[in-house]
Amino acid sequence: MNEDVSSEASAIDEALLAGLRNSRHVLCVSHVAPDGDALGSLTGMGHIMHRLGATTTLALQDETPAELKFLPGAADIVGPKQITDAYDLIICLDASSVDRMGHIYRSEAHAHIPLFVIDHHITNTRFGHINWVAPDCAATCQMLVYLVDSLGLPLDETLATCLLTGLVTDTLCFRTSNTNARVMEAAMRLMSAGANLSDITARALNRRSFNLFKLWGLVLPTVQLDEGVIWVHVRRAQTKAAGMTTGDVQLSSMLITANEADISAVFLEKVAENGGPAVECSFRARPGFNVGEVAFELGGGGHPPASGCTIQGTIEEVAPRVVELLKQARRKGLAAS
Ligand code: 5GP
Ligand code: MN
């Protein structure tokens, strides 16, 4: 039943295009704890489907982070309570496995509805009826630039703003190792269509809450480094003391800039849905090292240089085991270099 579509960004499957063109009531969804690519591809897809004449519901399990609320269409996003089963298509964006949609996707109520997956994670589990997975793209938003071309639609300022936001945030403003000429070409086209790069960068990347700095001040004194792996624990008491409620603590990308480190990890203490302890792990790696494989083995996913997973258990149980796996991944990278 599952159909795998070419990962060549320029060769988009006809069945996918026809499915988009022929659907009238569409549910678009992205991943829990949404980032810029999740929000950009979700709102961008909303605009695309609107242009195709469909009625579209945009849904996310979790709140839109404050720094991404400027995106055109973000105010229309609904949560799990507003979801029905009256759709003729579900489009899942930037999510590598079915669980990443959280409670928006209901496996029983939605089983009869075609599910299209559009994603750029190499760890994607191909859980849709049609899966367009393009790991050669730096962001799901980059894929949507090619989709717009294939659908014969114009890029306008609104759509370009959504798509450039995902491209800018997933590449950390064109600094990641997968930022190639195709990425710059897509970005240039989005800018030519009216997207404002400096405004997007200023809003989506260069703004942080004061409380986040308080949290960094609390956790950074305990940062650890061993065998080229740098990591930090973030306790619930610390997030609470800093006044943080939701959101990314944005430390893994900073820790990987340490001269001595090839791999970084952040272990964030959480409460699981069953009420037990859980740890949300965020990993980064320098080029030549692969943390995507580690996260995938632990039930999560991502890319070779940036990945994550959530593991049941306390930080004391989880972190030492995961640090060992990260050291192994580093040795593997060193051996291959
Ligand atoms: P971040 O560390 O910025 O939260 O996530 C880095 C990358 O790993 C992103 O591409 C994100 O989609 C992926 N990722 C993070 N956490 C998870 C997870 O729990 N499951 C899966 N499948 N991917 C994750
Ligand atoms: Mn992405």
Image (cartoon, rainbow, N blue to C red):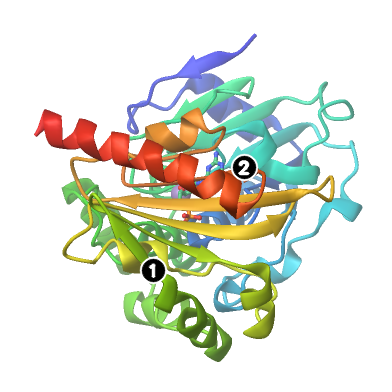
Tell me the kind of residue under disc 2: Ile
Foreground disc of the pair 1, 2: 1
Name above or below for residue 280 compared with residue 64: above
Point 40% across, 61% down: residue: 252
Q: Is residue 136 above or below residue 73?
A: above
Q: Which of the marked residues, 1 or 2, is nearer the chain's N terminus?
A: 1
Q: Residues within 10 Å of mark 1 (few under 14, many from 20)?
A: few
Residue annotated with mark 2? 311
Q: Which mark is residue 112?
A: none
Foreground pick, 177 / 279: 279
The spot of residue 79 in percent (x, y) is 81, 57
- Residue 13: % across, % down: 46, 22
Q: Residue furthest left?
A: 337
- Name the spot of residue 55 as percent of width and height, x first: 77, 48
Name the secondary structure under disc 1.
Answer: loop
Q: Which mark is residue 223?
A: 1
User: Which residue is located at x 49 percent, y 75 percent?
Assistant: 219
Q: Secondary structure at mark 2?
A: strand
The foreground one among 64 and 258 is 258
Residue type, mark 1 in image: Val
Classify mark 2: residues with Cα within 10 Å, few (<14), some (14-19) or many (20+): many
Identify the residue shown where x is 24% and y is 47%: 178
